[in-house]
Image (cartoon, rainbow, N blue to C red):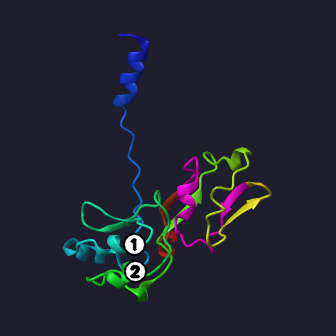
Amino acid sequence: MERRDFFKNLTQSIQMPKKKEVVARPAYFSNTEDFAKCMECAGLCADKCETHIIKIAEDKTPYLDFSISGCTFCDECANVCPEGVLQLEYKSDIDVEVYIDPKKCMSWSKNICFSCKDPCLDNAIEFSGMFYPEIVTDRCTACGFCIKYCPTEAIIIKEKVKENDDV
């Protein structure tokens, strides 16, 4: 066996734990357990989404695909939901946290890039000078518009830390 084949086989045999995939849901729900009601639905929320970011998972629940665009909070998904899972009274920011990975970000490598700042409707991305962008969490609605435009995929969503989780 050649050395290259040995190391290839060695690295393939090591099972790295898979990262838990974060699922972003439309902004109009009160309880994640309510998404079980979506199994009987025909995916009307996805049909009504003006930016086409609502997709239907294998389990028939809606999720947001920010690689396509972002959420305008147009309310149409809530208006059309026949099961009452998505309702206007529950409208809030999208229940994920958005952050910039400095290791992947061009600006953190001192290359001028404002790809994330320009599409941000909430002016939630601030730069120190021309470099080092950071997301101002107080202003960020997690709409996702910045994600599609990042050329290095440095903008990542993660689960929002709940206030009770810190204790």
Which three-letter amino acid code belongs to the residue tagged 1?
Cys
Q: Secondary structure at mark 1?
A: loop
Residue 127: give x, y in percent of width and height. Answer: 74, 60
Rendered residue at 64%/50% (across/down) = 102
Residue 7: give x, y in percent of width and height. Answer: 42, 21
- Name the residue furthest left: 40
- Name the residue furthest top: 1
Q: Which mark is residue 132?
A: none
**Disc 2 + disc 1, Cβ < 8 Å:** yes
Residue 22: give x, y in percent of width and height. Answer: 42, 60
- Name the residue furthest bottom: 89
- Residue occupied by mark 1: 49
Of 151 and 158, nearer the camera is: 151
Q: In the picture provided, is 119 more to the left or to the right than 16?
A: right
- Residue occupied by mark 2: 76
Q: Quadrant of residue 88?
A: bottom left
Viewer can see residue 126: yes
Residue 144 among magenta residues: yes
Rendered residue at 36%/37% (across/down) = 15
Rendered residue at 31%/81% (across/down) = 81
Q: Quadrant of residue 27?
A: bottom left
Q: Secondary structure at mark 2?
A: helix
When the figure is inspected, residue 153 is found, relative to residue 27, above or below; the finding is above
Which three-letter amino acid code belongs to the residue tagged 2?
Glu
Viewer can see residue 30: no
- Crowdedness of circle 1 by 10 Å Cα count: few (<14), some, many (20+)? many
Of 63 and 11, nearer the camera is: 63
The number of numbered discs placed on residues in the rendered structure image is 2
Please give the range of residues in magenta: 132-155
Q: Quadrant of residue 122?
A: bottom right
